[in-house]
Image (cartoon, rainbow, N blue to C red):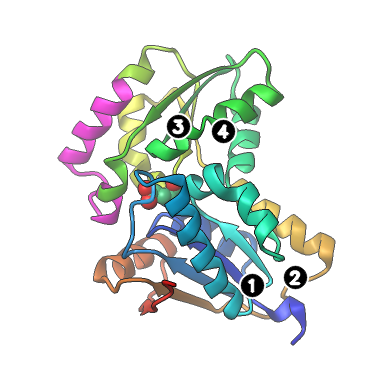
């Protein structure tokens, strides 16, 4: 089969990667996409690196069986903890979300005070801070893990009172540091963007790595000459069936899909 016609694989622990998928569809409307959400095992952010690596390997093997031509890790937890290991293990092009997030933040910050929110595993890895300081030596980086954001997003509680209360609890501390930009270092968080913006304040620019990630994929496909010119089909798989996944999928992508449950565990 002509490689350009093969789909792009995208994965996350659950619905979070749909925020990246949305940008991929905008930037690459003619690409076929196979999405995998590990809804049976979400959240990844509170799990060990070893376990997240094992899950990621199972997912990549599954996506390879779907004949994908390249993969986007639409998950900061996997990107920050396992990207290098996955890249050396698998013979398939893999794009992650951290570098695009860092590039976007550096573009928008003026006072070089950058906030990062993410899962416990992403914040613990310290990768965002390291990558920002590699590019912008005198940057001040302030990080905060916000673990409850993931279950709130999975539940579809996007702008509810409880979500505002939780966001206030987490973000109060960051407000002290006069940050001018805040990286959403978890792909679930753009679902809570309105709430986060309300709490952190209108003068802080919210940085969502998704758009830049989609651009990276586009550049890669162009460089290799393997863009699809006449696709556009999107297929969704989950490890546990849930109506919530389908609901959030229709909310984010404005497309109706019924995700198919598959078993990928080894
Ligand atoms: N959406 C993922 C991320 O970007 C994973 C969140 C989780 O499962 O804890 O980190």
Distance, label 1 to label 4, CA atoms, is 30 Å
Q: Find disc 3 in the rendering and name its residue.
A: 124
The label on residue 116 is: none
* Of labels 4 and 2, the one closer to you: 4
Does 57 sit above or below residue 75?
Answer: below
Residue situated in front as seen by the camera: 131 or 215? 131
**Residue at left offset 27%, top offset 32%:** 167
Q: Find disc 2 in the rendering and name its residue.
A: 227
* Of labels 3 and 1, the one closer to you: 3
* Of labels 3 and 2, the one closer to you: 3
**Residue at left offset 58%, top offset 41%:** 98
Distance, label 4 to label 2, CA atoms, is 31 Å
Name the quarter where the C terminus is drawn.
bottom left
Task: Identify the element where label 4 is drawn.
Answer: helix
What x and y, as percent, mark residue 57? Answer: 53, 63
Left or right: 130 in relation to 248: right
Specify which label sits upstream in the sequence, 4 or 2. Answer: 4
Please say whether residue 168 is one of the residues in the magenta stretch. yes
What x and y, as percent, mark residue 123? Answer: 45, 32
Q: Find disc 4 in the rendering and name its residue.
A: 127
Specify which label sits upstream in the sequence, 1 or 4. Answer: 1
Distance, label 3 to label 2, CA atoms, is 36 Å
The label on residue 31 is: 1
Distance, label 2 to label 1, CA atoms, is 7 Å
What x and y, as percent, mark residue 152? Answer: 25, 48
Mark 2 crowdedness (10 Å alpha carbons): few <14, some 14-19, many ≥20: many
What x and y, as percent, mark residue 88? Answer: 69, 55
Specify which label sits upstream in the sequence, 3 or 1. Answer: 1
Left or right: 1 in relation to 108: right
Q: The magenta stretch spans which residues?
A: 152-172
């Amino acid at each position: 089969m002509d490689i350009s016609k093969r789909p792009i694989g995208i994965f996350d622990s659950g619905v979070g990667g749909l925020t990246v998928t949305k940008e991929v569809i905008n930037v690459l409307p003619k690409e076929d996409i196979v999405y995998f959400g590990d809804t049976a095992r979400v959240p990844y952010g509170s799990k060990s690196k070893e376990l997240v690596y094992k899950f990621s390997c199972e997912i990549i093997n599954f996506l390879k069986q779907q004949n994908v031509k390249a993969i986007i890790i639409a998950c900061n937890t996997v990107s920050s903890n396992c990207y290098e290991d996955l890249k050396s293990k698998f013979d398939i092009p893999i794009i992650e979300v951290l570098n695009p997030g860092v590039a976007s933040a550096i573009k928008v910050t003026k006072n070089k005070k950058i906030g990062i929110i993410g899962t416990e595993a992403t914040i613990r890895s310290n990768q965002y801070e390291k990558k920002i300081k590699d590019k912008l030596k005198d940057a001040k980086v302030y990080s905060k893990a916000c673990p409850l954001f993931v279950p709130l997003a999975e539940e579809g509680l996007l702008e509810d009172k409880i979500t505002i209360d939780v966001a206030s609890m987490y973000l109060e501390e960051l407000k002290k540091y006069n940050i001018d930009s805040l990286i959403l270092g978890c792909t679930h968080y753009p679902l809570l963007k309105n709430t986060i913006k309300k709490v952190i304040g209108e003068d802080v620019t919210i940085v969502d790595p998704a758009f830049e990630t989609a651009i990276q994929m586009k550049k890669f496909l162009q460089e290799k000459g393997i863009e699809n010119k006449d696709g556009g089909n999107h297929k969704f798989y989950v490890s546990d069936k849930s109506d919530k996944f389908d609901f959030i999928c229709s909310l984010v992508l404005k497309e109706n899909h019924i995700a198919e449950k598959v078993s990928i565990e080894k």
